[in-house]
Image: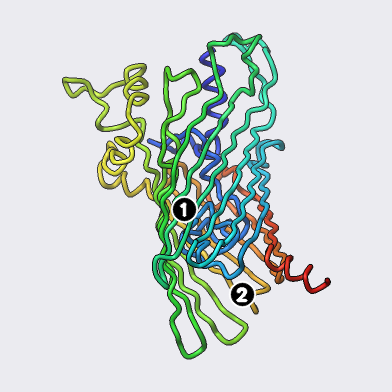
Amino acid sequence: MKKVFLGLTLLAMLFVTASAEEQMNPIITSMPSLSIAPDARSGGMGDVGAATAPDLNSQHWNPAKYAFMDSHGGITGNYTPWLRKLVNDIDLAYIAGYYTISEMAGTVSASFTYFSLGKVQLTDLNGTFLADAHPNEWAIDLAYSRKLHEYVSMAVALRFMYSDLNNGANASTIGATEMYPGMTAAADVALYYRQPIEIGSGTSYFGLGLNISNLGGKISYDQNVTQSFIPANLRLGVSYEIPFDKYNSLTINADVNKYLVPTRNNKFAVDGNGTPLTGESLTNWYSELSSPRGWFMSFADAPNGVREEFQEIQFGVGAEYSYDKKFFARAGYSHESKWKGNRRYATVGAGFHLSIFSLDVAYVIATAASNPLDQTLRFTVGFDLAGIKDLVNNKK
């Protein structure tokens, strides 16, 4: 039955280890779906969003940005067909929304993520078919944000996560001791700085963002016999919007991103004689690491030292052209070391925003050979609830 567990776990991590033959020491986490860019706006700019202008999907990137939203409330829905070059039944759905109580009382926001891994055939060690399973993962969170200063805001978020890798199929035919749904809770802490700067062509905006996300307990699929890290993450971003005239502007954005998760092949994983642990001993050592210890260890645990630590940093750059804040064109690039996952791709996107409705799309163009993320599409629709309320009131 270890084969069943290993097969489903590898499937859940597939997009993280897309180029396994080139990797040396990738960082593997449970609940990898929480690391996928869920929306088309950021997805069209190289997966950046920590410091971009506030939008309806800020909950994923930096919930502190909601404190700077112009409207009092809104809701958005996102859909991404995932790994379509490999399979046709893996999907990511994401819903987010916010409501501003008042400038003094702050803003509340929430989101729901659902990741379906399609249909998986479970087999025993001899390859005999046992059952069909429909693995899935989901997470729900709630955040509170408010301004600390005219240009600065802060947010905290709480998240509950649930991961079912065999969809209950082990209840009878496979044996009740093999695999169970895993669940845990985590928190985010975010900061956002956005300052207007007057220049000759109008008002420009400079932004900085920080989001430390998924700080929580580990997750287990075998009743705490072994435990896995969730994708705790540190994201930093910078953004600068340049107006050309009253209608045209260009925003340049960049993010750097690092998992606060130790590598499995860890330089600290040694016995009392300094001999590196292997096999079951390494598995047990890694499973017993506490989450807080893992967060701090992740900055200095790479076997190849500082060079490998820098390889663990992902970065993205993106640009957004806006005409009258209604029509948008976007492009970007996201980069990850080939030894840590090799997710390298360019992105393009477009958007159309009205006072109460918005529509965005994005497309991935892989730059690494045999990348299953190539040709990934993202779709986002959004609604300004305050605008809808005003429209209804005017009709009355």
* Dot placed on the residue nearer the N-terminal end, 1 or 2: 2
Q: Is residue 300 left or right of residue 374?
A: left
The image quarter containing residue 128 is top right
The image quarter containing residue 24 is top left
Instruction: Give residue 44's position: percent from left, percent from top.
Output: 59, 60
Residue drawn at x 61%, y 61% is 348
Q: Residues within 10 Å of mark 2 (few under 14, many from 20)?
A: many
Instruction: Give residue 372's position: percent from left, percent from top.
Output: 60, 42
| Residue 49 in view here | yes
The C terminus sits in image quarter: bottom right
Q: Is residue 88 above or below residue 234?
A: above
Residue drawn at x 47%, y 18% is 223
| Residue 53 in view here | no
Reading the image, the residue beneath label 2 is 322
Kind of residue sitting beneath label 2:
Ser
Kind of residue sitting beneath label 1:
His
Residue drawn at x 27%, y 27% is 269
Reading the image, the residue beneath label 1 is 335
Q: Residues within 10 Å of mark 1 (few under 14, many from 20)?
A: many
The image quarter containing residue 166 is top right
Colouring scheme applied when the structure was drawn: rainbow
Numbered-mark total? 2
Instruction: Give residue 174's position: percent from left, percent from top.
Output: 61, 10
- Observer-nearest residue: 108 or 102? 102
